[in-house]
Amino acid sequence: MPSSRKIILKHVMSGICTKMNRTKQLPSDLMETPLNRCLNTFDITLLGVGHMVGAGIYVLTGTVTKEIAGPGIILSFLLAGLASLLSALCYAEFGTRVPKAGSAYVYTYISIGEFWAFVIGWNIILEHMIGAASVARAWSGYVDSLFGNIISNTTISVTGQMHEELLSKYPDFLAFTVCLVYSLLLAVGVKGSTIVNSLFTLVNLMVMALVIVVGFIYADESNWTEQKGGFFPFGMGGVMAGAATCFYAFVGFDSIATSGEEAKTPSFSIPIATVLSMGIVTLGYVLVVSALTLLVPYYDIDPNAALPSAFNKVGITWVQYAVSIGAICGMTTTLFGSLFSLPRCMYAMATDGLLFSFLGNVNTKTQIPLTNLVISGLFSAIIALVFDLEKLVEFMSIGTLLAYTIVSASVIILRYRPSFETTVTKPQLALTPTSESSSSTSDTTPVSEIINLTGTLRLQYSWLGPVFGNREPGSVVTGSVFVYTIFSCALCILLQVTINGLWWTIVLACFFLIIMGGCLLVIVAHHQNTTGLRFKVPLVPLIPAISILCNIEFMIHLNYLTWLRFFVWMILGMLVYFLYGIHHSKEGDSNSSYSILMTSSEAIKEKWGSTTRINIKGALTRRKTSTSDRAAIIDEEDTPE
């Protein structure tokens, strides 16, 4: 093989790992954006509430109550809300750090690296696309049921049934139309569309309040007694299984973080909106299911129309009409949230060069990524038209949980990374073990001289110095987070597949827990960075660590076919990344040795493989801004023997 080809191939291959791990550099002005910063805290709060309170309250509650948890669904929603809150707090901290569109994708790009950021962004795209399609399908089904299934029966009589396993029973033209109509609504501009979303959300909340009040007025406490099955008819196992299912009713708070680039004061609005929306939604879910299970016995609940049928059974028929209005408004706002977030994630990835550049265009009049909105709305409509969403909804959840896991890990990593500066004066450094011997001389050090302690060992953990003391600040914490995540996966898999009573499984689980606890101890032993944050996750690293463990546990419970579909989707994503994204990333070195060799006049004029040593040397030495990788080429080829 000719020498020049060896050089190029060597540098291309050796730089792949570096490219995959490069992180996004933040601009000097984080508030600068081509998007329209017009959303206040009220708008963003209702955006998050609307995205979460939709199909979950009107569709999910009936199935979980009757078939999984019974009245214990109250605890299921509390547990699911707590697990979601842990991830939501991590999103809120990042929203104050990085007020940019892209949510978990941007956060991962800044803290972990480009490859994992692309993985998260690629899955977020699928999450919101399937999320929009599934809600459109639920919206269509609910309207169809109000008219006695006349829409579905008419469609089947005209088109016939589709008998493929992954396809739906019939093409849902109403769901297709709904996706397109709401995409057009979003195209008018972010402020106008959020006003409509806020109105629908307020109507939905008023309907929920009506359900709660009327439900408690007609409540029958005997529905929670042993005569009618008790409060835990399926045991605590049913409560936990219900919590895993109810967790997906809280998916949607990431739309709050996605709006960071359009918020007027993101450092204030994002955390406040996150906490408020999670509180409102959790309280609403708990009170609604409490009223539902007190109104009728859990085994009499209709899983397809839980609330309307429950009020019909007790003779309050007028409430079902209000519930129908609330259901339509709730599912509308959930659909709005998915279609709002999807084009902005595509925009963030495109502006970073990881997706095709035309997806980064912003319409100058409406100040939204209009092309992305059209594409995302059309693809969501096609999915809603032909696919069986019951099989795809679980597929959507795996990407969501993966994003939550990495964002939680990223919070820990950035808290201990020196790049987000936390500093102390040099006289304070005299308290550390390495400087105690020179304390007498440090007293004369000027106060203005600053030393960064972030990511270094604390004084009380100096006994760890022989092992971790000489490492680069922050690197030990990053490694500990990685090890903690790996052993969390191992623990969850062990608990999922183990047979109760085997002594070795207990010993192995204890070993995993000891390793995980050791990782947290190592993290706590380092100096943390909390300066400049208007909102920060409390009890770091404990809360993000619990969030990581909960999310992994939910992922392990997913069906194996979901993992298979996930890997298929990821194969498509890897093709996009390695064939396009890695070469067009804005974080790449535009003057790399590869680009210089391929853009030099010699490389253009001569055939591949025929470039001589003299041509390579000339192409390189004519460049005055030589980088370290180019110096390696010169050293290898031109050093005299």
Image: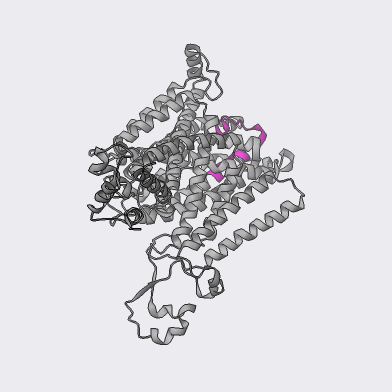
User: Residue at the spot x=56%, y=23% of the render?
Assistant: 165
In the image, residue 426 above or below residue 202: below
Work out whether residue 465 or residue 150 is closer to the camera in this orientation and state it: 465
Q: Is residue 497 visible?
A: yes
Q: Is residue 354 visible?
A: no
Work out whether residue 110 or residue 153 is closer to the camera in this orientation and state it: 110
Q: Quadrant of the C terminus?
A: bottom left
Q: In the displayed orientation, state which residue is furthest to the bottom.
A: 440
Q: Residue 291, image x and y in percent?
A: 58, 41
Query: Magenta region, mostly helix, strand or loop?
Result: helix
Q: Residue 628, image x and y in percent?
A: 33, 57
Quadrant of the image occupied by residue 125: top left
Can residue 470 be found in the magenta stretch?
no
Work out whether residue 493 or residue 615 is closer to the camera in this orientation and state it: 615
Work out whether residue 531 or residue 417 is closer to the camera in this orientation and state it: 417
Q: In the displayed orientation, state which residue is furthest to the front.
A: 641
User: Residue at the spot x=49%, y=48% of the render?
Assistant: 404
Q: Residue 187, image x and y in percent?
A: 30, 34
Q: What is the span of residues highlighted in magenta in the rendered image?
A: 285-308
In the image, 238: left or right of 325?
Answer: right
Q: Quadrant of the N terminus?
A: top left
What colouring method underlies this structural image?
one colour
In the image, residue 343 above or below residue 541: above
In the image, 589: left or right of 510?
Answer: left
Number of marks in the rendered image = 0
Q: In the displayed orientation, state which residue is furthest to the top.
A: 158
Q: Residue 382, image x and y in percent?
A: 42, 26
In the image, 244: left or right of 571?
Answer: right
